[in-house]
Image (cartoon, grey):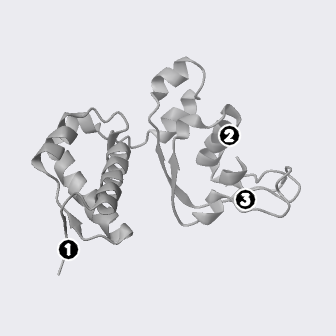
Amino acid sequence: ESELFGAMQGAHSTATRRMDGKLDAAEHGTLFLDEVGELSLATQAKLLQFLQSRQYYPLGSNKSRTADVRLIAATNMDLGLAVQEKRFREDLRYRLQVMPLRVPSLAERSSDIPDLMEFFAVRACQAHGFGRLKFSPSSLQAALNAEWPGNVRQLENAVEAAVIRAGGRGSLTIEREH
């Protein structure tokens, strides 16, 4: 809550000075809230109030602040089920679903896997100081056959791990760019 709305000095044990929140940082821009379904019900109520009025209260403050912020929220949670189970506010769900965008799981778009692997490999090779990595046909097929319950994030981590192992062992061919 203090991370989102900020906190005044003394508002809680770690607020040794005034702390600006993410809403302050995103002023005149866009704020991305990842895993919005994990917010506490109290924070959900405050977020709803902000979305309705563009005003919020930093923790420990009795003065409201105004923010001009676009909000993008994401979650892996089934918000409909969370509403039924009283873990997510129905009114907030409707406020957040102005323009819903469903990103299909990796299992629903497995044809993207080779391109994603190539993209992540290039990025990992650059980050770790290696040349380009070429995946064998069998490693591509193994990736296509995998389930990837963690979707693109899991694939990205698996590719980076493969790059590091290949670079460390020197057992896989790593093409150096000239």
Question: As rendered, which of 37 and 49 lies closer to the eye?
Answer: 37
Q: Note whether 129 is above or below 31 in the view shown.
A: below
Q: Amino acid at mark 2?
A: Thr
Residue annotated with mark 3: 65
Q: Amino acid at mark 3?
A: Arg
Q: Quadrant of residue 155?
A: top left
- Left/right placement of residue 26 relative to residue 64 reads left
- Residue found 56% across the figure and 31% down from its top: 91
Residue that sits furthest to the bottom in the current view: 178
- Left/right placement of residue 149 relative to residue 12 reads left
Q: Secondary structure at mark 3?
A: strand
Residue 129: x and y in percent read 34, 72
Q: Earlier in the sequence, mark 3 or mark 1?
A: 3
- Left/right placement of residue 6 relative to residue 13 reads left
Query: Dot 2: within a 10 Å radius of its alpha carbon, few (fewer than 14), some, or many (20 or more) residues?
Result: some
Q: Nearer the viewer, mark 2 or mark 1?
A: 1
Disc ID at residue 43: 2
Residue 78: x and y in percent read 45, 27
Quadrant of the image for the C terminus? bottom left
Q: How far apart in space, not on screen, are marks 3 and 1 (Cα)?
A: 54 Å
Residue 48: x and y in percent read 62, 41
Q: Amino acid at mark 1?
A: Arg
Residue that sits furthest to the top in the current view: 84
Q: Secondary structure at mark 2?
A: helix
Query: Dot 1: within a 10 Å radius of its alpha carbon, few (fewer than 14), some, or many (20 or more) residues?
Result: few
